[in-house]
Structures are given as structure tokens and as C-alpha cells.
Amino acid sequence: MVIVSHKEQRAVEVLDDVLCDRCGKSCKGKIGNVNGLHFDVVGSYDSTHFPDAICGYVPRVDVCERCASEWFASFVRNPLEPECSESDAAER
Ligand SMILES: [Zn+2]
């Protein structure tokens, strides 16, 4: 077997930070991790508010932890609060 190869240098893109789409501030934590939420907004044929992915436009959203927690607090069910079952409530 004869391997034909070469060495080359390539430029890579390195993520330094993500800015929150709600407040505009950094999503970077104290030790340098980028924290928060990222999601692609993908609709379907009968979506009423999100663009249908078939059109090729998929909005990307990044939200920092603080804004996400404030947003979750406005939900009917806050995903950051532990759910208690009826048996847990009876034990109190
Ligand atoms: Zn934010």
C-alpha cells in the first residue's frame, strides 16, 4: 500500500462568544463557557408564526441564561421549577 498525502494548514473558526438576542449581552460565563439557549425556529406547512422550513429561512435564536430564566418565569409551567407530585405535596 502506498499512501499519498500532504500537509496543509487550514483556518478554523473559533467561537469566542454568543450575544443574547434579547438583551444583547454576552452569554459567556465566568470561566469562559458559553451558556444559554440556542434553537432553530422551524415551522411547518400549517405554522402560523414560524416560517415554513421549506422556504429555506430558519431563524436562529440565542438567549442568555438570565433572559431565559426571566422568560421561563412567564410560562404557565416554568421548566426551571421542580415539579411536585401529589404524593410529594402530601408529605409536607
Ligand atoms: Zn439576555
Image: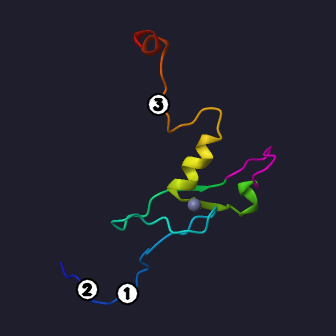
Residue 46 is covered by the magenta coloring? yes
| Distance from Cα at disc 2 to Cα at disc 1 | 19 Å
- Helix, strand or loop for the magenta stretch, by majority: loop
Q: Secondary structure at mark 2?
A: loop
Q: Is residue 7 above or below residue 14?
A: below
Instruction: Name the quadrant of the C terminus.
Output: top left
- Which residue position is annotated with label 3? 82
Circle 1 residue:
10
Q: Foreground: 68 or 40?
A: 68
Q: Quadrant of ligand 1?
A: bottom right
Q: Is residue 4 above or below residue 25?
A: below
Q: Say which of 38 and 25 sits in front.
A: 25
Q: Is residue 48 left or right of residue 84?
A: right
Image coords of residue 36 (percent x, y): 49, 56
> What is the x, y in percent for residue 11?
40, 86
Tell me which label, 2 or 1, sits earlier in the chain: 2
Residue at point 64%, 61% (across, down): 22
Q: Which residue is mark 2?
A: 4
Q: Which residues are magenta?
A: 42-51
- Compared across the picture, whether 76 is left or right of 55 comes to left
Amino acid type, callout 1: Arg
Amino acid type, callout 3: Pro
Q: Is residue 61 magenta?
A: no
Question: Residue at 25% across / 86% down in the picture?
Answer: 4
